[in-house]
Image (cartoon, helix red, strand yellow):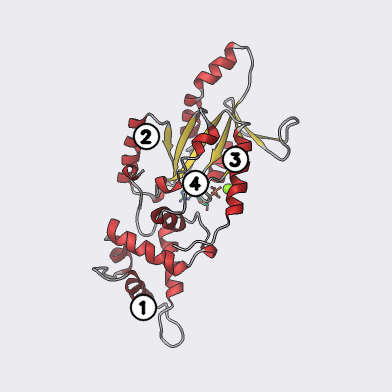
Amino acid sequence: MNIQWFPGHMTKALRMMEENAKLVDAVGYVLDARAPASCFNPQFQSIVGKKPCVFILNKCDLADSAKVERWRLFFDRSGLPYVKITATASAEAKKIVAVFDKVTAELQAKNRAKGVFKPIRFMIIGVPNCGKSTIINCLAGKKSVITGDRPGVTKGKQWVRLSFGLELLDTPGTLWPKFDDENVASRLCFIGSVKDDVTDVCEVASSLVQQLSVLYPQSIPQRYGVDCGEKEPAVIIDEIARKRGFLLRGGEVDRERCAKALLDDFRKGKLGGITFDLPSEQ
Ligand SMILES: Nc1nc2c(ncn2[C@@H]2O[C@H](COP(=O)(O)OP(=O)(O)O)[C@@H](O)[C@H]2O)c(=O)[nH]1
Ligand SMILES: [Mg+2]
């Protein structure tokens, strides 16, 4: 997978996260439930240190519930705090707040014992498009007060106060995983974390078709009525294009249009609930 990304942007995002991490007590690490391992960068540990961390498995509505269940078992067995949600659905905030509250209970008790009321501060991190802003909005809801810049805190940062003694840092952090793993790179493209304009959309769609035909062999035949068999991804894409009437003026297939449609269908959940990563791969 050829991704034209910019190391400078990554370094900048990393520095910003390091700076923000100093201002918070705890972290919410958002992972897309369709590719949780691909979204994860173990480097985060050295940035957040021993601060409590909650893994937020988001976009469960688009994921494979049986595999999400495998992730639940993994988190439970590893003793890692986590919550699985669909940030765009209503009433998910309660679930997040409950686990945020739980992982910081000790800290809250310490503060109380000292007689100080200090909100517990969380930072929301994760790859682009995993739903960080949606989660912040969902948590903020109507009860929130956007406190704006605070004197003494780095300028430009916004704190969103939740009505539970919790505060969110409204500058979500981006930490890119390693792109050298082919699966990680392709899956980040599928889920729209890497923008389509820095990749070759036909290449991404081919990789999607290839991985789907192994992991979810029924997804393409069911949606498009095209039998995959042992065919090359490009052949499958061309067949889908013909079925859909994605043709160029001379009658040739419009592979790019078909590639875009395929990715769009996947991202909207039209190919069914799909999860590429299993916990054992990590
Ligand atoms: N289907 C679905 N879409 C979601 C969910 N959470 C976020 N989104 C969508 O994913 C896209 C990216 O979300 P955003 O919060 O901007 O991601 P960010 O880049 O991490 O801040 C938006 O179109 C959201 O509406 C979810 O749980 N399910
Ligand atoms: Mg955002």
Label 4 vs label 1, nearer the camera: 1
Q: Give the distance between the C-alpha atoms of the residues marked 4 and 1, in whole angstroms.
A: 35 Å
Dot 1 or dot 3, earlier in sequence: 3
Secondary structure under badge 1?
A: helix
Q: Mark 1 points at which residue?
A: 242
Amino acid at dot 1: Arg
Residue at 45% from the left image edge and 82% from the top image edge: 248
Dot 3 or dot 4, earlier in sequence: 3
Label 2 vs label 3, nearer the camera: 3
Report whether 46 appears left or right of 157.
left
Amino acid at dot 4: Thr
Give the quarter of the figure containing the C terminus: top left
Residue at 40% from the left image edge and 80% from the top image edge: 253
Q: Are marks 3 and 4 in contact (CB under 8 Å)?
A: no
10 Å neighbourhood of mark 3: few (<14), some, or many (≥20)? many
Dot 2 or dot 3, earlier in sequence: 3
Mark number, residue 88: 4
Mark number, residue 24: none
10 Å neighbourhood of mark 2: few (<14), some, or many (≥20)? some
* Residue 237 location, quadrant: bottom left
Q: Name the residue under label 2.
A: 75
Whether residue 39 is situated above or below residue 256 in the rendered picture: above
Q: Give the distance between the C-alpha atoms of the residues marked 1 and 2, in whole angstroms.
A: 44 Å
Q: Give the distance between the C-alpha atoms of the residues marked 4 and 2, in whole angstroms.
A: 23 Å
